[in-house]
Image (cartoon, rainbow, N blue to C red):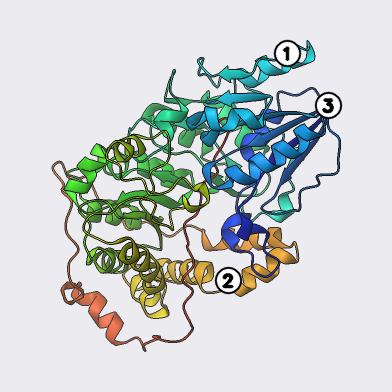
Amino acid sequence: MKVKMILPALTEAESPFWRPIKYSLFPPLGLATLAAYLSPDDEIDLQDQHVEKVNLNDTPDLVVIQVYITNAYRAYAFADHYRARGIYVVLGGLHVTSLPEEAAPHADTIFLGPGEETFPEFLKDFKARRPKKQYASAVRSLVNIPPIRRDLIKRHLYLVPNSIVVTRGCPHHCDFCYKDAFFEGGKTFYTQVVDDALAEIDRLPGRHLYFLDDHLLGNAKFASALFEGMKGMNRVFQSAATVDSILRGDLIEQAADAGLRSLFVGFETFSPQNLRQSNKKQNLQKDYRKAVDRLHALGIMINGSFVFGLDDDDRDVFKRTVDWGVENGITTSTYHVLTPYPGTALYANMKREDRITTSNWDLYDTRHVVYKTKKLSAGELEEGYHWAYKEFYTWSNITRASLTHDSAKHTLKHFLYSGGWKKFEPLWNFVIKSKNLGTMLPLLESILSKVKNSGAISQEPEARIEEPESRSQEPEAIQKKLKATPSTQGVTKEVTTSLALPAEILSVK
């Protein structure tokens, strides 16, 4: 059987003039995971439109397309193209699960929720010529799942080919997150068997790993055993976790010992009212600065995530957020315009209040305002979002943030990582188009090398969110460093495009 698997892209990812690096980070791990359930005799063609042109002139027996909100229209166009030629098409993923009525007319079969159980069931029915129109996930388990078909991944086209997912979902229930809709009808958070996860890691070449899990520390027992098993593997890895998990226990120290060098942290907002509005209870009464200090003491760089446009945000939120990130040495910041995805509690609430202004899914990219705002106008919100990116990544602020670290090595790593990521986009564009992105991986591994620990900061029992202090209140040592550093303001023209890294949206996640 010939099987075609497609991950459609956003339009700008195909631009012949400019290729943002964010679209060439991770391979289509969800589709490669589903491919493992196919027969070894099946001929599989896995194509990621982010990094290659999709061939539409073939005649496979089955087409599998992964759909998320900002590629939905393109996914439907591909599906319609193949169905018009009499080829069987299946659609799955976050957007299909959220809006099955919209997706169903474009497919012969749709999948709701994770695919570890339903895709093998479909394949059995398909070969027996009795496939169902819809499959919904109910059983949630990662026990004895087959190894991912990484042989189908074109590694040289990605900066981070060693992406991996060892858990599914998240234990928290934030109103703006798609997770509850995708995992409805079963477990919303579950893990692999530790030995299976370690075996998957062991199969990956090189040193670098990127865990795409929503919350790698979400199950402390699993994470602790995983990190213990990773000791001695000589790996360096990046992942994501919550403020609460960083402050609790010694799990973050175990992660650092196992090779954690960079962490995506969802700070989101400094406003307790906003946190309550979005049901992000795990961040309430937590001290963001103490979490940052603890990570820095372990030599872990931070990618801070922040959301603009919650109802308590005013015109000062952009400057407050940027200043806090710079003063606290956040290595990279990912900013988002609040986006009410279909299937989320946020979308349901805004729909009920008649606040949704458009159903053009191309605009649901966390860069555009798609709802009626309150304290900020839509124009102010989008303008502030772009200003925050531009301001945070000025050379002067990259330098200021770098100099907040005690270790000279950490300072240099911060400067190289932040500057290299955002200030050399023309170079990234050249490397991507010359199909040599894989050659940059050793440089990434070098920058992620270990910083000598200066002693972890212990958790604070009743820590709290602190409002950002003004720059005049910086520690004296930092002020002295800054005074001794020549200003780099205006060294290069800033780029105002979004840095937001769309985490890989997996059809089996």
Q: Which one is nearer the viewer's eye here, 474 or 14?
A: 14
User: Against 497, is 465 above or below?
Assistant: above
Q: Which one is nearer the viewer's eye here, 105 or 443?
A: 105
User: For mark 3, what is the residue?
Assistant: 42
Element on which disc 1 rests: helix
User: Against 19, is 57 above or below?
Assistant: above
Labels 1 & 3 near each other (Cβ < 8 A): no
User: Against 323, is 48 above or below?
Assistant: above
Disc with the residue nearer the chain's start (3 vs 2): 3
Element on which disc 3 rests: loop
Disc with the residue nearer the chain's start (1 vs 2): 1
Between marks 1 and 3, how big is the CA–CA gap? 14 Å
Q: Nearer the viewer, mark 1 or mark 3?
A: 1
Q: Whole-percent x and y of residue 153?
A: 73, 43
Element on which disc 2 rests: helix
User: For mark 1, what is the residue?
Assistant: 124
